Amino acid sequence: MFSPGWTEMIIIGFIALLLFGKRLPEVARSMGQGFVEFKRGMTSIETDMRKAAYSEPTPAKPVETKRVEEDLRPTADKFEAPEPPRQDD
């Protein structure tokens, strides 16, 4: 994995100083705040996932409705297959 040494860090710092100049502290602060928010969001997602994975499922309560006899009657006639045609020789 990439692991920068002291010389690489000095070069990166120098390039950042050239690019951002006086605004470097503001840029570093905003990057730090962004990193903290990202980490908080990832922790929140991880916590939600663990809760969902290890919690007991809650059984759904059946909906109680009063059924009337009309609701229980079939809406169409019973299907009867037609008789196959006879083949007389």
Image (cartoon, grey):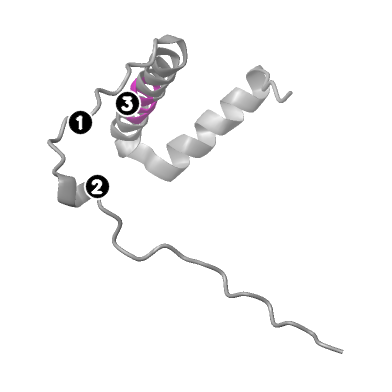
In what element is the residue under mark 2? helix
Q: Which residue occupies 29% across, 61% down?
A: 75
The mark found on residue 63 in the picture is 1
Image height check: is 20 above or below 31?
A: below
Q: Are marks 2 and 3 in contact (CB under 8 Å)?
A: no
Residue sitting nearer the eye, 79 or 56: 79
The mark found on residue 72 in the picture is 2
Disc 2 or 1, which lies upstream in sequence?
Answer: 1
Q: Residues within 10 Å of mark 3 (few under 14, many from 20)?
A: few
Looking at the rendered image, the quarter that the C terminus falls into is: bottom right
Residue sitting nearer the eye, 82 or 7: 82
* Residue 87 x/y as whole percent: 79, 85
Q: Quadrant of residue 61?
A: top left
The mark found on residue 44 in the picture is none
Find the magenta span and give its range: 34-41
**Kind of residue indicated by mark 2:** Leu
Disc 2 or 3, which lies upstream in sequence?
Answer: 3
Looking at the rendered image, the quarter that the N terminus falls into is: top right
Q: Is residue 19 covered in magenta?
A: no
2 vs 1, front mark: 2
Residue furthest out toward the bottom: 89
Q: State left or right for residue 12 relative to residue 4.
A: left
Residue sitting nearer the eye, 53 or 10: 53
